[in-house]
Amino acid sequence: QQQVKQSPQSLIVQKGGISIINCAYENTAFDYFPWYQQFPGKGPALLIAIRPDVSEKKEGRFTISFNKSAKQFSLHIMDSQPGDSATYFCAAGDDKIIFGKGTRLHILP
Amino acid sequence: DAGVIQSPRHEVTEMGQEVTLRCKPISGHNSLFWYRQTMMRGLELLIYFNNNVPIDDSGMPEDRFSAKMPNASFSTLKIQPSEPRDSAVYFCASHWGGPKTEAFFGQGTRLTVV
């Protein structure tokens, strides 16, 4: 019940395309769903987060879509740029945050 | 503020040796988390503290691992004795208002046990 399953493991997208990363959770008590971005040699940094009272949150080119009944949420990166190439982690939790295993995103120039 | 500071950045040690990783959280943050990152398992939560008190250590893999937070500005993660399978990048992260707020990660300690 504590797992957060993330897919795909790796993703290659053309510059200007849409990158989509999906996550699923099991514990219905989870009420906080952040996404973190990690560049090589650095620690993860918060990108965007959502709580279950909304179905979508947008910040610039980054959008989280949340489906409470399906216990799924996803990150969409619009107009993907080479600078977006990084590892992305979804996470979920209540009193502690559980991370997915990460998606290595590569944007082709 | 310089952010979360971890030391050392890199550590190479021989199997059986004791290893101590250090973390200085951001001033004013009251929650501190230790994570381990590997390719196979991703980012695993090891232990977290709230107001210097250990709250959940269920992620600590074995008794060889221990963590302390003697005050609000310092935490250690110790492995004794170390084993090759402990090789990973270890991160600490601090929060200002509990787990459901932004986590500020340090740059990590890359541990290699040979």
Image (tube, rainbow, N blue to C red):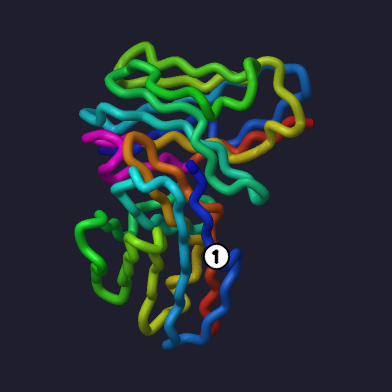
Q: Which residue is mark 1?
A: A7
Q: Quadrant of the C terminus of chain B?
A: top right
Regarding mark 1 in the picture, which secondary structure is present there? strand
The foreground one among B46 and A2 is A2
Lateral position of residue B41 relative to residue B92, left or right: right
| Main SS, magenta residues | loop
Q: Is residue B102 above or below residue B67?
A: below
Q: Position of residue A79 (x, y in %)?
A: 37, 84
Q: Position of residue B7 (x, y in %)?
A: 50, 30
Name the residue rendered at 34%, 53% in the picture. Answer: A33
Tell me residue A15's x, y (percent): 47, 86
Q: Crowding at label 1, few (<14), some or many (≥20) Cα neighbours within 10 Å?
A: some
Q: Tell me the subunit letter for badge 1.
A: A
State which region is magenta: B94-107
Which amino acid is tagged 1? Ser
Give me the residue at 38% from left, 74% from top.
A76
Q: Is residue B106 magenta?
A: yes
| Between A29 and A14, the one nearer to me in the picture | A29
Against A34, residue B88 (above or below) is above
* Residue farthest along the top direction in this orientation: B70
The correct choice, above or below, for A13 with respect to A70 in the image is below
Q: Is residue B88 magenta?
A: no
